[in-house]
Amino acid sequence: MNFFPTPYPDEILYSTMARYCIRSGNIKEIHNFEDLFGTRNCIAIMELPTRLDALVENMPMGTKYTAEYFIYKHTLFPFLAAFIPKERAEKIIQTMRNGEGAVSYMRIGLISNSITLNKYFRFCPECFKEDIETFGEPYWHRSHQITGVFVCSKHKIPLYNSVELIRAGNRQRFISASHENCIAEEEINYSNDLMKKMLWIAEDVEVLLNNQFGFKQPEWFRSQFRVKLIEKGYARMNNYIYQKKLKRDFIDFYGNEYLALVQSPVSVNSGSWLPDMVRNNDITTYAIRYLLLARFLGIPIADLFNTKLGSNDEDENNIDAYQELWDQRLIELSQSGLSIREIADILKSSTKTIRKATDRLEIKEFWKFNGGGKYLHSKFTNTEEFKIKRKDLRERWLELHAKYPDKSSNQIRKDNDGVYAWLKKYDSEWMEENYRRINNRVNHVDWNKRDAELLPKVKEVIKEMKEDKPERITWTTIGSKLGISGWLSKRKEKIPLTKAYIESELESLEEFHIRRIKWGIEELERQGKEMTLWNLVETAGVKPKYMKGIYKEIKQILNNRGYDCNFKF
């Protein structure tokens, strides 16, 4: 290859290779595989691509890329292989460097775990816009392609399915993200409770993807979970686990609806994946399930891998002696004046566990009312330390305003939220007196002039959308192409000429699908391909479930062109 695109942040390698194919100038797509891998005998794989050694060898002279760099930074390997033993992980890496793709999927357990992988490439509408603004083009983000991740951790909004299939159709071509295949046709809304849980897992997945943790044996994770199970009362130190209590509380924590969405349902009265994760066996399950259990037990991902939990000199087989020593230590620490967090750190427990223990031991919860237990005999606001801190933060707040005379307090606090938050809590009257508000000047717009200038541009954009591969004509797509999606539809009443023209061209979802079907049929004829349902689905980019609703129109179009339409949905 004479060149190779620089991978973008969080870009899946599949997407980078798709961008190469666009720029290569090759007429036949199969020639791109010869460029990339030196052979036609391979397929486009998204999660765990293979022949990466050949890819690196075929790169321009002086390239600094390595197979390991792509594996860890631009594939799903760091997530999918996070909880498997080192020996298996090394075999998978070797397969990805120079082997067959199906072998990696079997070794990593994706087939035996009965997890249904994502069918379509996924995208975040906000990331899509930002990528175009920043890089001039959209791309597939690897964090969005994880099965079990439903939201973008950056923008905290739902992910959408594109129209591009991951494992169907022509597997010997790489497909880029585009306006044509990334269309949020119907708005997705999740409840606040579901969104909270989805964000938990999305954030934990990001940690796995972006940190190269060392591989561990199954016993390591089993031991880590066991320590927390004992601490939270779900197990005894003699290895007995209260399975029903664990499963009930686990279901209450996540809810059956969410567990079903992440393909990890738990039944109280029958076997499931959850008990297997804490029993003495070498079973490895899908990575999402490790994250679910870790989050439930309150174990940060970094600690799960890097910190040996529960390491102590007590006899772990004598729960009564251990509990007695632990209780005695808690009683001693509760008289020391330490805060609840400091006590929790010393006992390697959570603050929630400490609170439960103090209730059980009837220890007076002194830390509730005295600055976290730090000030045993006086209020924090009466201490000299408080007065010094208030003076320092007041001076800091005034210095910031002097440094940025044109900024409002609201703008200044964005980068200095700690200063603002403390003063707002402990010195609210002074803060109100020293809070600067700046009235933004309103720019007067000549909307008649803007309307006249905008109309011909809109006509040109719509013309292009009709001539090339069909795109649905909506306010959003038009605004996006003109770079004014932020205000176009919101100010349409101020541009009557443009509004009238756009509304005359707007099309329903069914009308758009029919237009794409017509274009797809013509494209198949041009390419000399057989007129089958799946060829039409792949070319036109219309899912079968939408085709079913316009079957009569499709049949009429095909009959008019001399085809017998006998598609079965």
Image: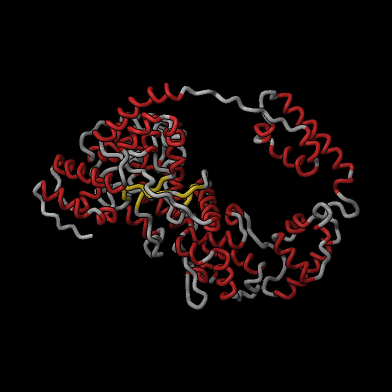
- Is residue 264 visible in the rendered image? The answer is yes
In front: 271, or 424? 424
Picture coordinates of residue 476, whole percent (x, y):
39, 38
Whether residue 515 sits left or right of residue 204 in the image: it is left
Q: Quadrant of the C terminus?
A: bottom left
Q: Quadrant of the N terminus?
A: top left
Residue for point 59% across, 57% down: 304
Give the residue at the far bottom of this rendering: 269
The relative height of residue 420 versus residue 216 in the rendered view (above or below) is above
- Is residue 348 visible in the rendered image? The answer is no
Give the residue at the far left of this rendering: 562
Residue for point 32% across, 39% down: 506
In front: 390, or 448? 448
Whether residue 84 sits left or right of residue 37 in the image: it is right
Residue for point 32% across, 56% down: 102
Picture coordinates of residue 87, whole percent (x, y):
45, 57
Picture coordinates of residue 531, whole percent (x, y):
15, 50
Picture coordinates of residue 459, whole percent (x, y):
31, 29
Q: Quadrant of residue 141?
A: top left
Whether residue 343 sits left or right of residue 447 in the image: it is right
